[in-house]
Image: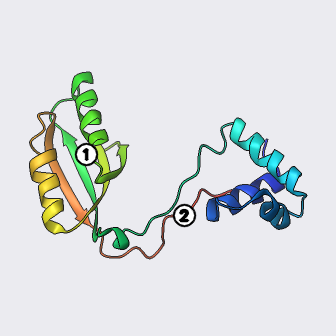
Amino acid sequence: MIDSIDAKLLATLQRRADLTAQDLGEVLNLSASQAARRRQKLESDGVIQGYGARLSPQALGLTVQAFVQVQMAAHTAENARSFANLVASLSEIVGCWTLTGEADYLLRVWCADLGALNQLIHHRLLVHPAVARVQSQIVMDQPKPDAGLPV
């Protein structure tokens, strides 16, 4: 069970995962050791699954973000396994979801430019034997940046 202090700890870590136990304790009005124990318990319980850094796509030369819908040619276990392997091998694909509805998969991709997006779609995705159709939407702006989960 997550209490209000754990909720505040989780919300704080989603914004700043690099905080020390001392800093976290100050935010939570706890001692550093109490804050560290709470964080450790949330980690061991699997509530906190890991830590990462948010990188600037522009600083890395990635100027095009797109969402790509993929419709499978046939719904077989082998096609699903083969497509999952393809997705895992392509670093441009930063997120992948299976969906209900017309599209079977939704991919979030980052590419250096439109040419790179074209290459990804036409020379990696559409040529895969499991793929029947691909539809892409290029992101024009992102008014709300990626955020943590509501706690």
Q: Inspect this view and state whether residue 89 appears.
A: yes
Indicate the position of residue 36 as horizontal and vertical percent values.
80, 50
Q: Callout 2: helix, strand or loop?
A: loop
Q: Which residue is mark 2?
A: 147
Q: Inspect this view and state whether residue 104 appears.
A: no
Indicate the position of residue 101 as horizontal and vertical percent values.
30, 44
Q: Quadrant of the C terminus?
A: bottom right
What's the residue at 14%, 46% (across, down)? 124
Q: Callout 1: helix, strand or loop?
A: loop
Q: Amino acid at mark 1?
A: Glu
The answer to which quarter of the image holds residue 28 is: bottom right
Distance (Cα) linking label 2 and label 1:
27 Å
Q: Amino acid at mark 2?
A: Ala
Indicate the position of residue 7 as horizontal and vertical percent values.
75, 55
Indicate the position of residue 136 as horizontal and vertical percent values.
21, 59
Q: Are marks 2 and 1 in contact (CB under 8 Å)?
A: no
Indicate left or right for 101 with 128 as reference. Answer: right
The answer to which quarter of the image holds residue 78 is: top left
If you read the primary sequence from the N terminus, does the residue marked by circle 2 or circle 1 appear first?
1
2 vs 1, front mark: 2
Q: Quadrant of the N terminus?
A: top right
Q: Residues within 10 Å of mark 1 (few under 14, many from 20)?
A: few
The answer to which quarter of the image holds residue 43 is: top right
Indicate left or right for 55 with 118 as reference. Answer: right
Q: Which residue is mark 1?
A: 102
Q: Residue furthest top?
A: 77
Q: Residues within 10 Å of mark 2 (few under 14, many from 20)?
A: few
